[in-house]
Image (spheres, grey):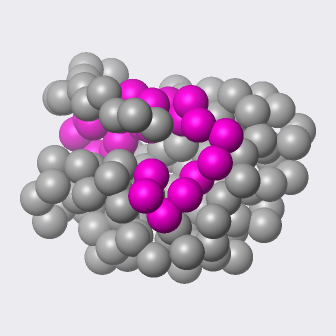
Amino acid sequence: MTTEKKYDTPYGILECYDCYAVFHLTSTDVSVELAEHVLGISNAHYKGRQYVFISEREFASNVDPEAYKYVNPKQMIGHAIVSESEDVRDEAVTEMDLYKGAVSFFSSVEEAANWAQTVVKPS
């Protein structure tokens, strides 16, 4: 995994790779502002190419359902949630109903990255 570009945001670090972005969430709330900011960066980085968004979470976060309105499903074609926390796993189940693309839960970023490479079609 070689990082193409790393972005420091007020909400955490976003690392963009060839076909997936890894967001290291440091906020306890996934707000509309967070989604607009972070997804805006990732969409601009991939310039219309498809990618999987990997959200690495160490703790459960309150997710505003309105935040998913900033997802461009033609570009962000998968969402992986990475955590070893049962609370995060429980939260992720409710989030799956908010996102219309492929969603999966993993215990490591490496597993999520491997999954992303099967979801994104080579261009």
Where is residue 81 shown, x and y percent of the image? Answer: 62, 46
Quadrant of the frame with the N terminus: top left
Where is residue 69 shown, x and y percent of the image? Answer: 45, 77
Name which residue lies at 88% across and 38% down: 86
Q: Height in image: 1 above or below 39? A: above
Name which residue lies at 79% across and 62% down: 93
Q: Is residue 57 magenta?
A: no
Query: How many dots with numbers?
Result: 0
- In the figure, residue 74 lies in which quadrant? bottom left
Quadrant of the frame with the C terminus: bottom left
- In the figure, residue 27 lies in which quadrant? top right
Could one spot residue 90 in this view of the protein?
A: yes
Could one spot residue 82 in this view of the protein?
A: no
Where is residue 94 shown, x and y percent of the image? Answer: 78, 67
Name which residue lies at 71% across and 46% down: 61
Q: Is residue 30 magenta?
A: yes
Where is residue 88 shown, x and y percent of the image? Answer: 78, 43
Depth order, front residue of 119/65: 65
Name which residue lies at 82% across and 32% down: 85
Q: Is residue 41 left or right of residue 108?
A: left
Q: Which residues are magenta?
A: 12-34
Q: Height in image: 12 above or below 1? A: below
